[in-house]
Amino acid sequence: MDINLTFLGQMVSFAILVWFTTKFIWPQLNAAIEERQKKVAEGLAAAERARAELKDADAKAAVEIKQARQQAAEIVERAQQQANQIVDKARAEALVEAARVKAAATEEVASMQQRAREELRGWVGRLAIQGAEKIVQREIDATAHKAMLDQLAAEI
């Protein structure tokens, strides 16, 4: 192998290139690589945190949904109870009203019976007087014998 000046020039140039690269370029490349590694590590850590937060949020959402369902069930149950109370109250009021109407109707029937009896007594009294007139063949004075006619109507 023949070492000549060209070869020596190339070696010196190569040595300068290696020195220049290690002095000025290599530190910037290392810094860029390290910065990129930090960003990737931070991104992975953020993804892991996000995954954990998502898991926590899912758990919280499940708890909230469960609580909302329980509250909805309680609201439905209270509404059903209120509806039952309203129905029971209406039923009780209807029974009271029916009893009142029945009592009023019974009282009215009793009053009508009493009036019918009084009217019937009056008719029977008049019929008795007419019958007695026919038997006696003379007219009986109703005003003169009012006390006797009232007693007769009361007995009937």
Image: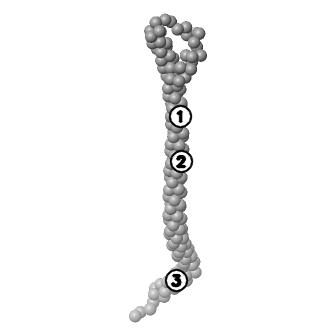
Q: Between 152 and 27, which is closer to the camera in this rendering?
A: 152
Q: Nearer the viewer, mark 1 or mark 3?
A: 1
Would you place residue 16 above or below residue 42 in this image?
Answer: below
Q: Residue 124: x percent and y percent?
A: 48, 17
Element at label 2: helix
Q: Residues within 10 Å of mark 2 (few under 14, many from 20)?
A: few
- Is tag 2's residue or tag 3's residue first in the polypeptide sequence? 3
Which residue is located at x 50 percent, y 62 percent?
66
- Label at residue 103: 1
Q: Which residue is mark 2?
A: 85
Q: Residues within 10 Å of mark 1 (few under 14, many from 20)?
A: few
Which quarter of the figure has residue 24?
A: bottom right
Q: Nearer the viewer, residue 61 or 75?
A: 75
Extreme-left residue of the structure: 1
Do tag 2 and tag 3 residues touch (Cβ < 8 Å)? no
The residue under the point 52% across, 46% down is 88
Quarter of the figure with the N terminus: bottom left
Q: Earlier in the sequence, mark 1 or mark 3?
A: 3
Q: Which mark is residue 18?
A: 3
Q: Is the residue 99 above or below the residue 108 in the image?
A: below
Q: Amino acid at mark 1?
A: Ala
Say which amino acid is labelled 2: Gln
Q: Position of residue 44 (x, y in %)?
A: 51, 72
Marks 1/3: CA distance? 122 Å
Query: At 53% from the left edge and 24% from the top edge, which residue is drawn?
Result: 155
The reply to whether dot 2 and dot 1 touch (C-beta < 8 Å) is no
